[in-house]
Image (cartoon, helix red, strand yellow):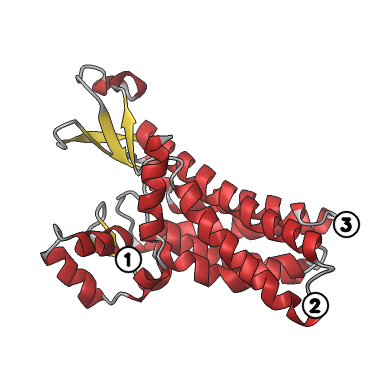
């Protein structure tokens, strides 16, 4: 539990919404003084050390909560049986998720053609799942958008990070030396990210606000209900995102025997970046 609480404190730092406002110039300055505490905080939230790229402001983890407020609220208020509206909402949501998955990947290079193909596959599969679930829903309540979001989000991340699975990710030894590429490590990294960010986050953010609103609907004046729901959605997402990101460490440790046979002779633990 101590490891989890240390990770959740670190996760709260990188999900600070003010990090989404940091300019590229500020990130570049932080790179020059990376040993300073504030520089480290900026780099952890705004810079992908695996790809050595500055993450565009809207796709930083710190921006996920503010950007998702209108999306989640609409998912809660729009009936899942309205297929066209559901399809549109999930297209917007999964387009944004595709950007987050790409910029927070664990390091695989992607060509323009590969990015376009992965994005098309991610949004098409995600929206198809949302459309089909909406089509068959008959009074399914909040669980329909929950299931659609979980299935669509998981499909999205596997599509956008398919290179991590098919090609693999870089594996390092205890001296932080690059010793090769592992598909097993890549699949593990993507699966962990899908479970924490694509399954647990939407489940929490869609179920908890709905339950709170139903419990307190009689004491909240109707004219304030929309604002109350938005506040509850943001508050839930603000805590759910770092809480789920912290479930798995960002640097995954492996015993050599868990990976491909070419790594079995190595001594000590090996590690790879999970990505966000």
Q: State the separation of the CA atoms marked 3 and 1.
A: 40 Å
Which residue lies under the disc numbered 2? 221
- Front residue of 270 and 165: 270
Work out whether mark 2 precedes mark 1 in sequence or the reverse, and give the earlier one.
1
Can residue 65 be seen from the camera position used here?
yes
Q: Label 2's element?
A: loop
Q: Residue at x 81, y 56 (%)?
A: 141
Which residue lies under the disc numbered 3? 139
Image x and y of residue 172, in percent: 21, 35
Q: State the separation of the CA atoms marked 3 and 2.
A: 25 Å
Rate crowding at label 1 as few (under 14), some (14 to 19) or many (20 or more) other CA atoms within 10 Å: many
Q: Residue at x 81, y 70 (%)?
A: 219
Image x and y of residue 245, in percent: 45, 48
Image x and y of residue 88, in percent: 67, 71
Image x and y of residue 84, in percent: 75, 70
- Front residue of 116 and 245: 245
Q: Label 1's element?
A: loop
Q: Which mark is residue 55?
A: 1
Can residue 276 be seen from the camera position used here?
no
**Quadrant of residue 232 within the rendered picture:** bottom right
- The quarter in which the N terminus is drawn is top left
Residue 252, relative to residue 243: is it above or below?
above
Q: Is residue 133 left or right of residue 200?
A: right
Q: Is residue 225 left or right of residue 20?
A: right
Residue 9, relative to residue 255: is it above or below?
below
- Front residue of 38 and 177: 38
């Amino acid at each position: 539990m101590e490891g989890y609480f240390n990770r959740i404190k670190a996760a709260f730092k990188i999900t600070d919404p003010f990090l989404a406002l940091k300019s590229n110039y500020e990130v570049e300055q932080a790179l020059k003084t990376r040993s300073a505490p504030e520089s480290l905080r900026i780099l952890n939230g705004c810079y992908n050390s695996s790809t050595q790229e500055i993450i565009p402001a809207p796709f930083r983890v710190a921006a996920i909560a503010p950007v998702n407020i209108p999306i989640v609220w609409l998912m809660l208020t729009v009936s899942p049986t309205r297929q066209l509206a559901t399809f549109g909402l999930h297209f917007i949501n999964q387009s944004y998720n595709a950007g987050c998955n790409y910029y927070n990947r664990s390091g695989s290079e992607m060509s323009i053609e590969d990015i376009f193909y992965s994005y098309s596959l991610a949004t098409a599969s995600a929206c198809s799942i949302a459309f089909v679930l909406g089509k068959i829903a008959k009074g399914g309540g909040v669980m329909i958008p929950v299931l659609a979001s979980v299935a669509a989000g998981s499909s999205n991340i596997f599509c956008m990070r398919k290179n991590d699975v098919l090609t693999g990710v870089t594996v390092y030894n205890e001296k932080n030396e690059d010793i090769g590429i592992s598909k097993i490590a890549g699949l593990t990294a993507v699966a962990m990210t899908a479970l924490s960010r694509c399954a647990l986050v939407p489940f929490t953010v869609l179920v908890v606000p709905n339950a709170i609103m139903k419990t307190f609907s009689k004491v909240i004046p109707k004219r304030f209900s929309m604002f109350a729901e938005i506040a509850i959605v943001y508050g839930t997402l603000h805590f759910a995102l770092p809480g789920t990101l912290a479930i798995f460490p960002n640097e995954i440790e492996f015993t050599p025997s868990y990976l491909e046979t070419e790594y079995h002779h190595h001594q000590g633990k090996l590690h790879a970046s999970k990505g966000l």
